[in-house]
Amino acid sequence: MASHVPEGSQRGYIIPIGGAENKRRKPLILQKFAELCGGKNARLAIIPTASKLKETGQNYIDIFRDIGVDYCVSLPIEERSDSECVEYLQELNEASGIFVTGGNQLRLSTIMGGTPVAQAIRRRNAVGVHFAGTSAGAAIIPEHMIAGGKAGPTPREGGVIFAPGLGLTNKIVVDQHFRQRDRLGRLLSAVAFNPFATGIGIDENTAAFIDPEGMLEVVGSGAITVVDPSELFHSSMESENRGKAINLTNLRLHLLTSGAKYDINSRQVFN
Amino acid sequence: MASHVPEGSQRGYIIPIGGAENKRRKPLILQKFAELCGGKNARLAIIPTASKLKETGQNYIDIFRDIGVDYCVSLPIEERSDSECVEYLQELNEASGIFVTGGNQLRLSTIMGGTPVAQAIRRRNAVGVHFAGTSAGAAIIPEHMIAGGKAGPTPREGGVIFAPGLGLTNKIVVDQHFRQRDRLGRLLSAVAFNPFATGIGIDENTAAFIDPEGMLEVVGSGAITVVDPSELFHSSMESENRGKAINLTNLRLHLLTSGAKYDINSRQVFN
């Protein structure tokens, strides 16, 4: 559950990235994140836990240094016991931005869930530290995380696997690699279970910069697909047989590209 | 997400019941709930939405009248459009207790999720109205709801299906008909996904009376199984193949019977 914002503080940005963001040539998304965190004077903490590749953390350190951030550190959290490491908690407490890499989002939830590191991330975001995550790092952001599911455009019984995420927000559920991996069906399945959150499907090299007031701005070369179920008339998720298509009526759909804005609280589009 | 408790208010009880509670002979659990809500002077609102049987609401009205509550009303919410009914919202606003019957918890989430009725329940509970739910009505209580899964004692990949619930609390996940339907494996699977919440498995004719401070007391003839993952060493949920058993180490387990207490915040047992 998102940490309470203390009196006088302002929440940090929440920035889910759809994966495969440009890293060397025109790294627009990572640049914008770095600027938000203080540019040259930013202090970035990178969490490579979703990835099993040893070099993931160092790769992002190199990328952010190329972009011009002097202070970048990677926290190699590989086991639950690492999620209590005092040194890592200290880095999180001093960071102006936290970046979570791609990999498998279930590594993030099983290794960090319920630990001091997960608490520290929520608390720091609540007092203004910006959080960006790409691919698995984007999936983990909401309270309800899409952990898996079926490809294809049709929502189905069993079309999505939910797990508890990091809980920086409960207003949205996030899917990524959205067009590239044909995930409309699983985002619709997610919304069909309990139509309270807005579904946000993010293409590769595309990010949702969500400001402290909940205004989302699209950055990058692809689109963000928004599925708003607030006027949903009917979902048949409860009555469908195994794997069958789901009846879902009266959804509102937006396809937003670079520069478009969407208020995740009022659910209004601003072009 | 649980509504914020306003200054000067106190949250109401949250009472998940494991299903098949005694109704005519020694209805201890329902009696205790009715007393908590004001006994003879209680105003009970019954939500029979999980059930497809037309008589479910009236049955509980009769039972609570037998117990001695004068004012009981059933809110026949059968479609999403019913979840905006002004009359039903008025009943919820005047109720001292809300009771949700058994059936299919996905009917509750698909029909009420994101609607004014769901908001009203959270807000009323945050200002002191007591909430009890049996079977499906118990499953819907937490933010992360167990919507289905596999029977048997072993946690498995795919052993549990999560969906967003009502969100009266995020500290626990609830399973019911616990011993009767052999659900230890699915509760363990739930905890294995993201070990931040405590797993609560409730037998039939057994209830967890959770007071405003988070102290849980066992009432009824069966047991409550508590799975506390706060010291979990490792979960292999992220790496197991389809349907395979999961490695889960260093869980703490409690089996609690009538009168035993458990603090869901400090995770301590009081016998």
Image (cartoon, coloured by chain):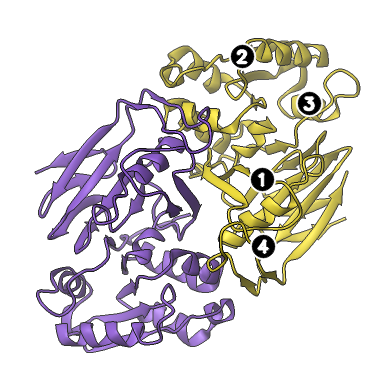
Chain colours: A purple, B yellow
Which residue has dot 1 on it?
B174
Residue at the image position 48 percent from the left and 54 percent from the top: A1
Q: Amino acid at mark 2?
A: Ser
N-terminal of the two: label 2 or label 1? 2
Residue at the image position 51 percent from the left and 33 percent from the top: B109
Tag 4, which chain? B
Residue at the image position 32 percent from the left and 88 percent from the top: A58
Residue at the image position 70 percent from the left and 61 percent from the top: B228
User: Which one is in front in this view, the residue at disc 2 or the one at disc 4?
Assistant: 4
Which residue has dot 2 on it?
B74
* Mark identifier at residue B155: none
Tag 2, which chain? B
Q: Amino acid at mark 3?
A: Leu
Which residue has dot 4 on it?
B245
* Residue B236: % across, % down: 59, 69
N-terminal of the two: label 3 or label 2? 3
Which residue has dot 3 on it?
B30
Element type where label 3 sits in the image:
helix
Gap between marks 1 and 3, in whole Å? 19 Å
Nearest the viewer among A181 and A145 is A181
Mark 1 nearby-residue class (10 Å; few <14, some 14–19, many ≥20)? many
N-terminal of the two: label 4 or label 3? 3
Residue B57 visible in the picture: yes
Element type where label 1 sits in the image:
strand
Nearest the viewer among A141 and B216 is A141
Instruction: Find residue B268 and report its image quarter.
Output: bottom right
Residue A194 visible in the picture: no
Image position of A214 with respect to B54: above or below: below
* Residue B8: % across, % down: 55, 41
Gap between marks 3 and 2, in whole Å? 16 Å
User: Which one is in front in this view, the residue at disc 2 or the one at disc 1?
Assistant: 1
